[in-house]
Amino acid sequence: MSSGRDDSFKTMALAELRALIGSLVGDVRMLRAEVEALRVENCKFVETNDELLGDEIARMKKLPPRPSIKPSGMEKAIEQGNSGRSSHKRRGRDAKHDRDRLNREVVVKPSGSRFKGYETCLVRDIVLEAELVRYPRERWVTPDGKTIIVPMPDGL
Protein backbone atom coordinates (compact mmCIF):
# COMPACT_ATOMS: atom_id res chain seq x y z
CA MET A 1 0.00 0.00 0.00
CA SER A 2 2.79 2.30 0.61
CA SER A 3 3.84 1.98 -3.04
CA GLY A 4 0.44 3.34 -4.21
CA ARG A 5 0.74 6.25 -1.86
CA ASP A 6 4.26 6.95 -3.09
CA ASP A 7 3.09 6.88 -6.72
CA SER A 8 0.25 9.32 -6.07
CA PHE A 9 2.61 11.53 -4.08
CA LYS A 10 5.13 11.49 -6.94
CA THR A 11 2.42 12.29 -9.49
CA MET A 12 1.14 15.14 -7.37
CA ALA A 13 4.66 16.43 -6.75
CA LEU A 14 5.45 16.33 -10.51
CA ALA A 15 2.26 18.24 -11.35
CA GLU A 16 3.08 20.87 -8.74
CA LEU A 17 6.66 21.13 -10.01
CA ARG A 18 5.47 21.55 -13.62
CA ALA A 19 3.06 24.32 -12.59
CA LEU A 20 5.77 25.97 -10.53
CA ILE A 21 8.28 25.78 -13.41
CA GLY A 22 5.68 27.21 -15.83
CA SER A 23 4.99 30.16 -13.54
CA LEU A 24 8.73 30.71 -13.04
CA VAL A 25 9.33 30.72 -16.82
CA GLY A 26 6.56 33.31 -17.20
CA ASP A 27 8.08 35.42 -14.42
CA VAL A 28 11.55 35.23 -16.06
CA ARG A 29 10.12 36.40 -19.42
CA MET A 30 8.33 39.28 -17.72
CA LEU A 31 11.49 40.27 -15.83
CA ARG A 32 13.59 40.15 -19.02
CA ALA A 33 11.16 42.51 -20.79
CA GLU A 34 11.21 44.82 -17.78
CA VAL A 35 15.03 44.79 -17.67
CA GLU A 36 15.16 45.66 -21.40
CA ALA A 37 12.76 48.58 -20.87
CA LEU A 38 14.89 49.80 -17.96
CA ARG A 39 18.05 49.57 -20.09
CA VAL A 40 16.49 51.74 -22.79
CA GLU A 41 15.32 54.25 -20.19
CA ASN A 42 18.77 54.26 -18.57
CA CYS A 43 20.45 54.97 -21.94
CA LYS A 44 18.15 57.97 -22.42
CA PHE A 45 19.00 59.23 -18.94
CA VAL A 46 22.74 58.80 -19.57
CA GLU A 47 22.53 60.79 -22.83
CA THR A 48 20.53 63.56 -21.17
CA ASN A 49 22.92 63.61 -18.22
CA ASP A 50 25.95 63.82 -20.53
CA GLU A 51 24.42 66.81 -22.33
CA LEU A 52 23.58 68.55 -19.06
CA LEU A 53 27.02 67.88 -17.60
CA GLY A 54 28.66 69.14 -20.80
CA ASP A 55 26.64 72.34 -20.59
CA GLU A 56 27.46 72.69 -16.89
CA ILE A 57 31.18 72.16 -17.49
CA ALA A 58 31.13 74.71 -20.32
CA ARG A 59 29.37 77.19 -18.01
CA MET A 60 31.93 76.65 -15.26
CA LYS A 61 34.79 77.13 -17.74
CA LYS A 62 33.02 80.29 -18.91
CA LEU A 63 32.78 79.01 -22.48
CA PRO A 64 30.10 80.43 -24.77
CA PRO A 65 26.74 78.63 -24.49
CA ARG A 66 25.55 76.20 -27.10
CA PRO A 67 23.85 78.04 -30.00
CA SER A 68 20.13 77.57 -30.35
CA ILE A 69 19.62 76.28 -33.89
CA LYS A 70 16.19 76.92 -35.30
CA PRO A 71 14.52 74.34 -37.54
CA SER A 72 15.05 75.00 -41.23
CA GLY A 73 11.40 74.85 -42.20
CA MET A 74 12.18 72.20 -44.81
CA GLU A 75 9.78 69.80 -43.10
CA LYS A 76 6.90 72.26 -43.59
CA ALA A 77 7.77 72.67 -47.26
CA ILE A 78 7.79 68.91 -47.75
CA GLU A 79 4.45 68.51 -45.95
CA GLN A 80 2.81 71.25 -48.02
CA GLY A 81 4.09 69.74 -51.26
CA ASN A 82 5.96 71.27 -54.15
CA SER A 83 2.92 72.62 -55.99
CA GLY A 84 4.28 76.18 -56.10
CA ARG A 85 7.74 75.07 -57.20
CA SER A 86 6.80 72.78 -60.07
CA SER A 87 5.02 75.49 -62.07
CA HIS A 88 8.22 77.57 -62.43
CA LYS A 89 10.65 76.19 -64.96
CA ARG A 90 14.19 77.48 -65.00
CA ARG A 91 15.13 79.31 -68.16
CA GLY A 92 18.18 78.22 -70.11
CA ARG A 93 21.32 80.29 -70.27
CA ASP A 94 21.71 82.77 -73.05
CA ALA A 95 24.95 83.50 -74.92
CA LYS A 96 24.30 87.21 -74.40
CA HIS A 97 24.83 86.79 -70.63
CA ASP A 98 28.02 84.80 -71.15
CA ARG A 99 29.88 87.72 -72.74
CA ASP A 100 30.65 89.09 -69.27
CA ARG A 101 32.38 85.84 -68.32
CA LEU A 102 34.78 85.66 -71.27
CA ASN A 103 37.96 83.75 -70.36
CA ARG A 104 40.12 84.19 -73.48
CA GLU A 105 39.98 85.37 -77.05
CA VAL A 106 41.58 83.63 -80.05
CA VAL A 107 42.14 85.57 -83.31
CA VAL A 108 42.57 83.54 -86.52
CA LYS A 109 44.09 85.30 -89.58
CA PRO A 110 44.37 84.19 -93.22
CA SER A 111 47.29 85.24 -95.43
CA GLY A 112 47.23 87.40 -98.58
CA SER A 113 43.91 89.25 -98.01
CA ARG A 114 42.61 92.65 -96.76
CA PHE A 115 41.01 92.98 -93.29
CA LYS A 116 37.29 94.00 -93.29
CA GLY A 117 36.24 93.61 -89.62
CA TYR A 118 35.01 90.73 -87.43
CA GLU A 119 32.09 88.37 -87.32
CA THR A 120 31.95 87.13 -83.71
CA CYS A 121 31.14 83.55 -82.78
CA LEU A 122 30.94 82.45 -79.11
CA VAL A 123 31.86 78.87 -78.22
CA ARG A 124 31.33 77.43 -74.75
CA ASP A 125 34.22 75.10 -74.03
CA ILE A 126 34.98 73.00 -70.93
CA VAL A 127 38.49 72.96 -69.46
CA LEU A 128 38.26 71.64 -65.89
CA GLU A 129 35.74 74.42 -65.48
CA ALA A 130 33.30 76.12 -67.80
CA GLU A 131 35.23 78.46 -70.08
CA LEU A 132 33.81 80.81 -72.67
CA VAL A 133 36.10 81.42 -75.64
CA ARG A 134 35.48 84.13 -78.22
CA TYR A 135 36.60 83.42 -81.76
CA PRO A 136 36.37 86.72 -83.67
CA ARG A 137 36.33 85.41 -87.23
CA GLU A 138 37.95 87.98 -89.44
CA ARG A 139 36.31 88.97 -92.71
CA TRP A 140 38.64 89.70 -95.58
CA VAL A 141 38.23 90.83 -99.15
CA THR A 142 40.50 88.93 -101.53
CA PRO A 143 42.33 90.72 -104.35
CA ASP A 144 39.66 89.45 -106.77
CA GLY A 145 36.86 91.15 -104.70
CA LYS A 146 35.50 88.04 -102.95
CA THR A 147 34.62 88.26 -99.17
CA ILE A 148 36.13 85.55 -97.00
CA ILE A 149 35.26 84.77 -93.37
CA VAL A 150 38.04 82.86 -91.65
CA PRO A 151 36.81 79.31 -90.84
CA MET A 152 36.61 78.08 -87.26
CA PRO A 153 39.63 76.09 -86.01
CA ASP A 154 39.43 72.31 -86.33
CA GLY A 155 37.82 70.43 -83.46
CA LEU A 156 35.01 72.86 -82.64
Image (cartoon, rainbow, N blue to C red):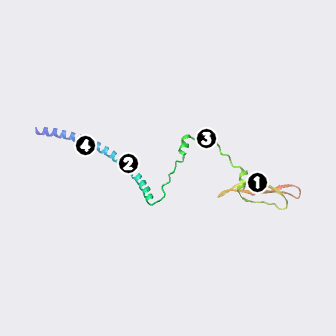
Q: Earlier in the sequence, mark 2 or mark 1?
A: 2
In the image, 14 versus 40, the foreground residue is 40
First in sequence: mark 4 or mark 2?
4
* Residue located beneath label 1 in the image: 121
Q: Position of residue 52 (x, y in %)?
A: 42, 54
Q: Does the residue at mark 2 contact the one at mark 1 (Cβ under 8 Å)?
A: no
- What residue appears at the point 24 percent right and 42 percent down from the top-left corner? 20
Q: Closer to the camera: disc 4 or disc 2?
A: 2
Q: Secondary structure at mark 3?
A: helix
Where does label 4 land, which residue? 21
**Are there few (<14), some (14-19), or many (20+) residues within 10 Å of tag 3?**
few
Residue 87 horizontal/vertical position (percent): 63, 40
Q: Are marks 1 and 4 in contact (CB under 8 Å)?
A: no
Label 4 to label 2, Cα distance in Å? Answer: 30 Å
Q: Which type of secondary structure does the marked residue at label 1 adopt?
A: strand
Tell me the kind of residue under disc 3.
Gly
Residue at the spot of label 3 = 84
The amino acid type, in three-letter code, at marker 2 is: Glu
Circle 2 — which element?
helix
